[in-house]
Image (cartoon, rainbow, N blue to C red):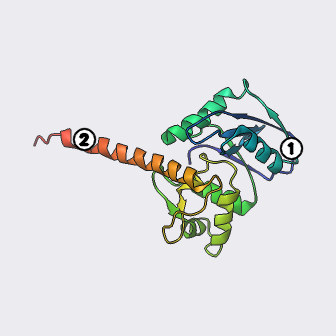
Amino acid sequence: MQNLTASHVSDRDEYLHFISLESSLGFPLTAVSPRGICAILMGDTREELERELRRESAAQSTAYSDFGLEGIGAQTVKTIETPQLGVSLPLDLQGTPLQISVWQALQAIPIGETARYEEIARRIGASNAVDSVLQACLDNKIAVAIPCHRVVGNHGEFGEYRSGWKRKRAARSRSSSLNAECGAKAARIISNLTYEP
């Protein structure tokens, strides 16, 4: 996995601080609890994302923190633009045990690769819970850091995505391009090697 995770169910009365910076995929909103990043929401406007955060975090107070979270917001944008950088901060996963198992399994999918919903279900020991895996992907509030865009349908179809299929396509395309670039670099290095018996 790319980083450490902290697992909790969201039933606390506490402040969530958040920031939203512009990226090529819109205005990702990054929200932080005392335990780590608890949301990275993707959308077209800051206002839309703030409403979504407040709606889904009704039991928690929210506060915009421009200066204090600037570095964390910038890290989110860098991860979107350059997937291999990853998110280095702890994640505060807020969900059921099954959801958390799914999200942790998604973190293990290498950049540029994909996995099917049924594969994820098998990996977490719940082969009959394919529909629950799909729902866990749709319920994932930490886009990019928990890469639901790397999951495809059981027959290879594109699959659903909380932030919309256009963003899923863009995120997957970026990861695939990175893999191709790394492969090309490796091929060039190998071609320049000489064998001396």
Q: Indicate the position of residue 141 as horizontal and vertical percent values.
A: 70, 50
- Hey, which quadrant is residue 76 in on the image? top right
State how far apart marks 2 and 1 are (Cα): 52 Å
Identify the residue at image location x=49%, y=51%: 172
Q: Is residue 85 visible?
A: no
Q: Indicate the position of residue 2 as horizontal and vertical percent values.
A: 56, 44
Identify the residue at image location x=80%, y=53%: 9
Q: Indicate the position of residue 140 as horizontal and vertical percent values.
A: 68, 54
Identify the residue at image location x=46%, y=55%: 113
Q: Secondary structure at mark 2?
A: helix
Amino acid carrying mark 1 in the image: Gln
Structural crowding at the residue carrying mark 1, measured as other residues with C-alpha within 10 Å and reported as few (<14), some (14–19) or many (≥20): some
Q: Which mark is residue 77?
A: none
Image: 115 above or below 84 = below
Structural crowding at the residue carrying mark 2, measured as other residues with C-alpha within 10 Å and reported as few (<14), some (14–19) or many (≥20): few
Drawn side of residue 141 relative to residue 23, left or right: right
Q: Which mark is residue 60?
A: 1
Amino acid carrying mark 2 in the image: Arg
Report which residue position mark 2 lands on. Answer: 188
